[in-house]
Image: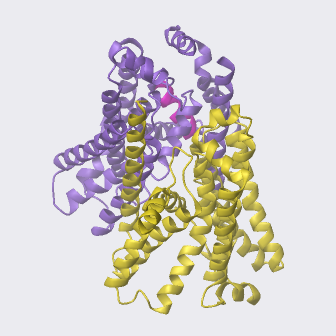
Amino acid sequence: MLKRAYQSFRKQDSFFGVLASAAFFLVLAVFSPYFFQTNNLLSMQALIAPRAIMAIGMMLVVIIGMFDLSVGSVMGLAGILCGYLLSIGVAVPLAILLSIGVGALIGLLNGFLVAVCNIIPLITTIGTMYIFRGFCEMVMTSNLAMSLTGFPQSFLDFGSMTFLGVYPMLWIMIALLVVTEFILKRTYFGRRLYYIGGNPASARSLGFNVKGATIICFVASGTLAALAGVLSIARFQSASRYLGQGLQMDILIACIIGGGSLMGGKGDMKGAFFGTAFVALLENAFNLFEINSLFKSVVVGAALILVVLFDGYVHLKKMRELGKV
Amino acid sequence: METIKKNQYLHRKFQIGDYTILFLIAGLFLLLTLTSSTFCTHDNLYSLLYGVSIQFFAVIGFTLLIIMGEIDLAVGSMYGLSGTLVGFCMTVWKWKLLPSALLVLIVCALFGYLVGTLVTKFKLNSMMVTLGSLSFVSGVNAVVFNSFTAVTYNAEYRSLAKFKIGGIHWTILAMIAIVVVLEFLLQKTPLMKKYYYIGNGPETARLYGIKSDRYKRVAFMLSALTSAIGGIIATSRITHSDVLTGNGLEFTLITALVVAGASLAGGRGGILKAALGMLFIAMLANGMTIYRIDPFIQQVMQGIVLIVAVYLDVRMNSKKA
């Protein structure tokens, strides 16, 4: 019974991510006396929730064998735009909707460029990453401030209230995780994404709408990144110039640690969550053990190389077994 | 069938259509000369060329990789790291310029070779591996940079970029020499022509007995090495190192190469075209600065140029096939 449960767990894509983040969690819980303090747990929530929401969108794109490097800029732009709209007195729901709408439009642009214009995702999303980071700076320079503050009280309350000890953003994250996992595993659309990622050419010849699915995944990624941006400025009560800068690497690494493969066709939402948890715990560890945060990008880069190496090794072994190399 | 067509492309004589970039440069040059009084002055053009000649070092190895259909996104961070490391050796260990530069170049080349080995041995996507090494190298740069007090480097280091031969900065002369020699090697010698064969059809190249893995490893090493050389000279020019040196350089290089007719799918491009592409991008930036366009809008413009260039590349290739 236990063995069978283990074996079905072992077969899942997210096995490695769950194991790694659980191990890391234990290490932190044992070695740091501050880990279980309320403040640390609350800041962990604010660290994990926006990233996991972005990771959901990224995971959808990774499953179809692509990736989206513009999420950091989209998150920043949506947050800064929302902050700007609120600071000039636009009603809260309208400001939120507009910012998320902009995120969806950027996702649409990415999807259009990739699926219709056939530009590879790397170039498309690096291009849009730079373009919209430039837009963020333009909104900020018109204000001559490092960060935007002074939002309406109802917006701030939404960010900092807790329900059962948990911020609303975490509830939103849980709801989104459950919904997307259901779509991926239980609907035709979701299952098709795996076929498309596994073998785009044969998916196309089977009559799947590959272009449509690609666009939908990129739109989802853009929308969710924008949502993450809005939620994080509600929590931090300010929209900083650097919001979301470089975050795309963390998110991509989280997805790959969580069982996604750059070759496509692998990954699920459990993996998106646990991969994010791993990266967030890493960041938390830097704070708890007071390690210089400059080392973070070294560790993240090394982790990405290791994960890509592991992924490639497993893929190569499989291909050798099939006799294809 | 497709490979044969592409190989015919290789054996063609010089055709003006391959050099659309010349028209672009000429057009932009005319436009800027006519509309601005400050552009076509000796000082401005010379400093433009000088700037290009320093960044040009970073594009040498990068071009070889692009010809083979691989990519090295870590060029920009390597460009930043090398300058900081040389500064570290010279201020903290009190070394002379030559030994510290040599040590740094060896370290960077070894790192590039390691990346190349990972990519070829495990058949990894070079884009992803170098995305990781980008983060890794820029992190190391930040750590090293913060480990010693940031000061203006000593005169020995500063004089490196200022050295002149016959009244012209040596980097400009070096750029011209490298373009002439490398372009000749790439077009005429069997050794370097193999880069194009590998880019056009890796499988065919393998069947003909070309050791493409070895070529790729060497190109990854060269890419790290040449961008390190560029970074050392750039740091010498700006007299101190900065965590932001080389930030986004990979993006400029990709844009320059693609504007000048290289393809990310491999098999096309060349060192002369790379230099012309760099010149075009530098002129564009120079023009925007003359018109006092906000640097952030310049960033947006560069992103748009990149996407449009790649789009046109995809369009033209699909027509040929």
Please provide percent x and percent y for residue A221: 66, 58
Residue extent of the magenta highlight: B272-282
Residue A115 sits above or below residue B270 on the image: below
Residue A35 sits above or below residue A188 on the image: below
Depth order, front residue of B235/A77: A77
Please provide percent x and percent y for residue B248: 50, 50
Residue A72 sits above or below residue B316 on the image: below
Main SS of residues in magenta: helix
Q: Residue at x 37, y 22 (%)?
A: B182
Q: Is residue B143 magenta?
A: no
- Quarter of the rendering occupied by the C terminus of chain A: top left
Please provide percent x and percent y for residue B255: 56, 38
Q: Residue at x 75, y 66 (%)?
A: A100
Depth order, front residue of B24/B182: B182
Please provide percent x and percent y for residue A232: 63, 76
The colour applied to the residues of chain B in this rendering is purple
Left or right of A214? Residue A308 is: left
